[in-house]
Image: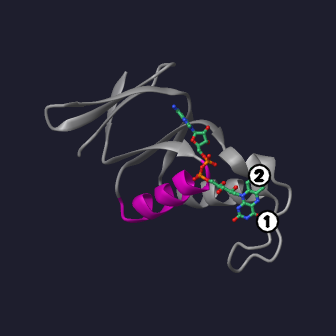
Amino acid sequence: MQVDYDVVIIGAGIAGVSAALYAARQRLKTLVISKDLGGQLNMTTLIENYPAIPKISGPELAKRVEQQARTFGAEIVFDEVKTVEKEDNVFVVKTRGATSAEASP
Ligand SMILES: Cc1cc2nc3c(=O)[nH]c(=O)nc-3n(C[C@H](O)[C@H](O)[C@H](O)COP(=O)(O)OP(=O)(O)OC[C@H]3O[C@@H](n4cnc5c(N)ncnc54)[C@H](O)[C@@H]3O)c2cc1C
C-alpha cells in the first residue's frame, strides 16, 4: 500500500523524532520510518546535557519525544528504508517491509 505524506523522516533517533515533533506540530502529515526508536540514545544510560532535563536515560528521552510527536499526529513505523527515489514531483520511499510512502519535495 502506498500512502502520501508531506514529510517522511528516515530514522527515529533524537534528530528524527525531534524533526517529527516540529513538522507534525505545523500540521504537516508526517511519517517517521525507522529500524528502531532512539538510535544511539539506546547506548547511553545517562544524559546530563539535555536542556531543562537534569538527568535522563537515552531510551526514556527518545520515548518522551516520540510520544510528544505522536500527540501532534506524527506516525511512526518500524521498518528499514531501502530506497528513496524522486519520481516526477514526489519522493518515493521504499522499505524492506510493507511500507511505501510519497512526500513532496
Ligand atoms: C554511549 C553514548 C553516549 C552518549 N552520550 C551522550 C550525552 O551524554 N550527551 C549527548 O549530547 N550526546 C551523547 N551521545 C551522542 C548522541 O547519543 C548522538 O549524537 C545522538 O543520539 C545522534 O542522534 P541522531 O538522531 O542524529 O542519530 P542516530 O541516533 O544514529 O539515529 C539514526 C536512526 O536512523 C535509523 N536508521 C538508519 N538507517 C535507516 C534506514 N535505512 N531505515 C530506517 N531507519 C534507519 C537508525 O535505526 C536510528 O534510529 C552519546 C552517544 C553514545 C553512543
Residue 55 horizontal/vertical position (percent): 83, 71
Q: Can you identify the residue that label 1 sits on?
A: 47
Label 1 secondary element: loop
Residue farthest along the right direction in this orientation: 45
Q: Which span of residues is magenta-colored?
A: 13-27
Q: CA distance from mark 2 to mark 1?
A: 10 Å
Is residue 15 covered in magenta?
yes
Is the residue at mark 1 in contact range of ligand 1, meaning its CB lies under 8 Å from it? yes
Q: Can you identify the residue that label 2 sits on?
A: 59
The local crowd at label 2, few if under 14, some if 14 to 19, many if 20 or more residues have their Cα within 10 Å, is: many
Any part of residue 29 in sight = yes
| Sequence order check, earlier mark of 2 and 1 | 1
Q: Amino acid at mark 2?
A: Pro
Residue 74 horizontal/vertical position (percent): 48, 51
Q: Residue at x 68, y 55 (%)?
A: 62
Is residue 74 covered in magenta?
no
* 72 sits left or right of 39 in the view: left
